[in-house]
Amino acid sequence: MLPPYRVRLFVIAALLPAALAAGCSKRSPQAIAGGHKAATGPVTVVYIPKNTGNPYFDSIVQGFKKGCGELHDTFTTVAPATADAASQIPFIQDQVQRGVSAIAISPNSPDAIKPALKQAMAQGIVVVAVNGDMPGSEDGREACVLPMDFGITGTSQLDLVSGLIGGKGDFAILSATTDAPDQNTWIASMKAALKTPKYAGLHLVQIAYGNDDPQKSLTEAQGLLTQFPNLKCIDAPTSVGIAAAAQAVEVANAAGRVQVTGLGTPNQMRRFVKDGTVKKFALWSPFDEGYLAAYLIHGMVKGAIKPGAGVSFPAGTLGNRQFGAKNVVVTGPPLVFDASNIDKYHF
Ligand code: RAM
């Protein structure tokens, strides 16, 4: 008979390998501190959009589902109810606990989520930013999928505004949250371009923030209409904001006097284009972003894709894609929608 403490030791020793194995398989396969090596088991991918209830992100989710389905990877999506700076942190931490192979995220605030993402990477989890990058915090993700070259998004927005109001007049921007990295990149480039002779006739009177919340965006848009009687255009580079701005203009009977443009989904904007409230706006395919990200992530988890400028990789039906600077891959192309083509698009 073994003394009781020996029995305890024996039991611990006997159970230890199984417990360790269970712990390892819960984690990203073959996780190693500060990096990851090729996984051989099933790939589990989670996508964390900015918030729930935004049809734009639903399209990205559909793209992920298609890509992950083709690759036989397991896909799930979770998101906070609001797009606040810190709202994604508990969701990231939860997924680290779950031991997923990869976290794809559309960041609400690079600064706020970077520490949690770094913890994920330290566990061997692949982290990819999707739809918005982490400017200045690129060490919080390994790669990034963007829908277009963000260096020209701002000026293409100004071109839309300028074209709609004859190059002259007051306009306002209705953005999402104050922290949103994509929005802030575009706003900064718009401000810089406004100092150049090409846009000298345009006068930016206000930047309002609707937090990608339909009701707040509507209230902000209505505020702009009352506060600036000479306003010629609202540019909302957010799918939530542009729909709210169009609604505000429609309700105020201001169509024609105040133009609305920006980035929106054809499904949400169709009725405003049909009734003449909105003449033109832009977007890309959010579905393709999710689809491309699924292929990129699968290759990274399996060790077949090592991000680096100039490296190219196969992305299913999208063909080969290539990393640019800072491990960014662009899906594209940007599209401009108006009454002549909107019925061709259903997302
Ligand atoms: C909104 C989000 C997103 C932006 C799109 C166009 O849903 O703010 O970040 O890229 O619109």
Image (spheres, grey):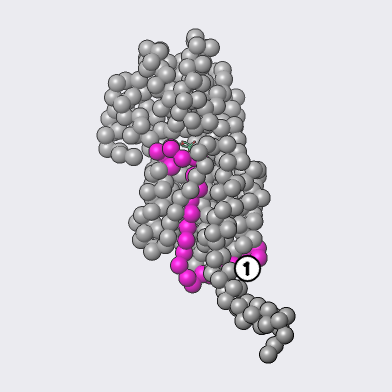
Q: Is residue 53 visible?
A: yes
Viewer-proximal residue, 209 or 282?
209
Q: Quadrant of residue 20?
A: bottom right
- Image quarter in which the C terminus is found: top left
Front residue (pair 190, 300): 300
Q: Under 8 Å from ligand 1: the CB of mark 1?
A: no
* Left or right of 44, for residue 18: right
Task: Give the secondary structure at mark 1.
Answer: strand
Q: Position of residue 2 (x, y in %)?
A: 70, 88
Q: From the viewer's perspective, is residue 179 above or below residue 292?
A: above
- Does residue 325 appear anywhere in the picture? no
Magenta span: 30-57
Q: Is residue 35 magenta?
A: yes
Residue placed most toward the observer, 75 or 262: 75
Residue occupying image coordinates x 71% and y 81%: 4
- Residue at screen point 56% across, 17% down: 205
Image x and y of residue 249, in percent? 41, 17
Q: Which residue, given by chain and number where applicable, does mark 1 sit on?
A: 32
Amino acid type indicated by mark 1: Ile
Q: Badge 1, how many Cα within 10 Å: few under 14, some, many 20+?
A: some
Answer above or below: position of 150 versus 96.
Answer: above
* Residue at x 65%, y 78% (from the top left corner): 12
Q: How many marks?
A: 1
Q: What percent of the width, then of the height, locates residue 112?
A: 64, 43
The N terminus, quarter of image: bottom right
**278 or 75: nearer the viewer:** 75
Residue ID at (47%, 32%): 238
